[in-house]
């Protein structure tokens, strides 16, 4: 098997798929080095195969010794990973956050409060003094401030309480099975709080030695998190995660919405079909050596086909991602036809139902 992500035989390899010849026929099997930490991006327009590829990677990591795979799942698309426990060790957990996993500044940002205003300052002090949401509320309740300030702070903390993510303890994420943190049904703000806590726990756990396995954090719809309070924790993993051994794989249909550091720090980019001009520019600017006009001519057409830009081998590799071992849960709902079948969803059809590959910006 040809290994991407490393020039040396370092140990465990995730089977990603096979090389793809120009006529689409499969070639040698392709794997990805998972023996050491990586920062990777999986990009492509809607329906091009990003979640499917993330699922393949999660399956491989779940079957790899010494790593702790965690999927931050915004849509519940990865719950199916746990459907074949004999083949793929995986579990689905509720999204839970310890209130003190968030710095006071993050609490203000999460609740849309100006930290220099009276209400923001009170919430900031509550987050500095208390370790649970209940204790933060008690702190606010007992505070000696103007009534309207106290009521406004209470309302904001009630909102946080209504998300349900601060109830109970978060699951231990350091196990060897794939852990799917199911964030479906959550708004962007609580989802960001969850992602922030997961990324911080992985990073700090490796620094203080409490996490033994090397964490692999897989984040779908990553633009949602780079636009929210999780951004700083994800940036930290991107820029400083390699030394403690934390890997991050971000999937997005909008790479232009990610900060430049997400593209520049990624040593692997799995590019499914991508047509938006701004999105292509996000790569052309940081990787002019790889992403030229020839690159655009090689752009994959079918869902599941990809170009892998690999810093280790300093090359661009045309591959087809292998089929999933567990069911793929990421397909969009489709209209039922008269004979009861859902509309076709073949390899040559885009998720939006067009049989062609005409794209344009998303
Ligand atoms: N490697 C593959 N092998 C076979 N089929 C695939 C592969 N990758 C994707 N597909 C097909 O393409 C469909 C769309 O893939 P997927 O759900 O991963 O797209 P996506 O890029 O994540 O879309 P969205 O942005 O809407 O979430 C899948 O339901 C599956 O049928």
Image (cartoon, rainbow, N blue to C red):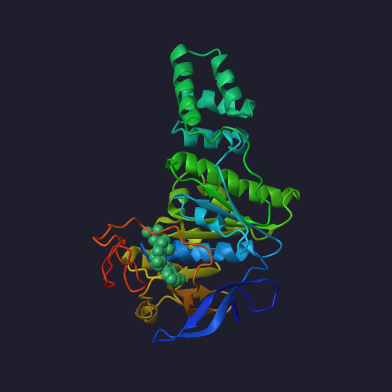
Q: Is residue 317 left or right of residue 90?
A: left
> x and y percent of residue 93 in the render?
57, 46
Residue at the (74%, 48%) spot, across then down: 208
Q: Quadrant of the C terminus?
A: bottom left
In the image, residue 289 sits, relative to residue 352, either above or below, namely below
Check the image and name the residue furthest to the right. 209
> x and y percent of residue 281 in the render?
37, 67
> x and y percent of residue 274 in the render?
36, 68
Check the image and name the residue furthest to the left. 338
Ligand 1 in which quarter: bottom left
In the image, residue 155 sits, relative to residue 55, either above or below, namely above
In the image, residue 124 sits, relative to residue 55, either above or below, namely above
Residue at the (68%, 71%) spot, across then down: 12
Residue at the (55%, 81%) spot, across then down: 29
Q: Quadrant of the N terminus?
A: bottom right
Q: Is residue 54 left or right of residue 87?
A: left
Q: Answer yes or no: is residue 229 visible.
A: no
| Quarter assignment of residue 352 | bottom left
In the image, residue 292 sits, relative to residue 149, either above or below, namely below
| Quarter assignment of residue 247 | bottom right
> x and y percent of residue 149 in the render?
46, 18
Q: Answer yes or no: is residue 94 visible.
A: yes
| Quarter assignment of residue 170 | top right
Q: Considering depth in this image, is 116 or 126 the residue closer to the camera?
A: 126
């Amino acid at each position: 098997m040809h290994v991407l992500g490393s020039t040396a035989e370092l140990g465990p390899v995730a089977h990603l798929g096979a090389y793809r010849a120009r006529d689409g026929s499969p070639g040698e099997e392709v794997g990805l080095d998972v023996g050491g930490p990586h920062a990777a991006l999986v990009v492509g327009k809607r329906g091009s195969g990003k979640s499917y590829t993330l699922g393949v990677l999660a399956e491989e990591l779940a079957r790899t010794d010494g790593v702790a795979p965690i999927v931050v799942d915004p849509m519940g698309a990865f719950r199916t990973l746990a459907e074949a426990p004999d083949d793929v060790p995986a579990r689905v957990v509720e999204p839970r956050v310890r209130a003190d996993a968030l710095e006071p500044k993050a609490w203000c940002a999460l609740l849309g409060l100006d930290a220099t205003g009276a209400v923001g300052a009170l919430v900031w002090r509550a987050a500095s003094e208390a370790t649970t949401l209940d204790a933060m509320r008690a702190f606010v309740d007992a505070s000696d401030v103007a009534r309207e300030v106290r009521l406004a702070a209470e309302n904001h903390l009630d909102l946080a309480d209504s998300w349900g993510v601060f109830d109970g303890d978060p699951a231990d994420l350091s196990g060897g099975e794939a852990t799917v943190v199911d964030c479906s049904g959550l708004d962007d703000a609580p989802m960001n709080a969850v992602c922030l806590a997961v990324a911080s726990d992985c990073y700090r756990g490796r620094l203080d030695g409490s996490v033994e396995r090397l964490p692999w954090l897989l984040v779908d719809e990553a633009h949602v998190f780079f636009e929210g309070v999780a951004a700083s924790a994800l940036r930290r993993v991107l820029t400083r995660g390699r030394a403690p051994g934390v890997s991050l794989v971000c999937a997005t249909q909008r790479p232009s919405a990610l900060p430049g550091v997400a593209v520049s720090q990624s040593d692997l980019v799995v590019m499914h079909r991508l047509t938006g001009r701004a999105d292509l520019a996000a790569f052309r600017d940081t990787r002019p050596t790889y992403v030229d006009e020839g690159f655009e001519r090689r752009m994959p057409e079918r869902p599941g086909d990809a170009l892998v830009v690999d810093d280790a081998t300093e090359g661009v590799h045309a591959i087809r991602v292998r089929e999933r071992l567990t069911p793929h849960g990421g397909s969009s709902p489709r209209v039922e036809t008269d004979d009861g079948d859902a509309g076709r969803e073949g390899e040559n059809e885009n998720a939006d139902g067009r049989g062609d590959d005409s794209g344009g910006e998303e």
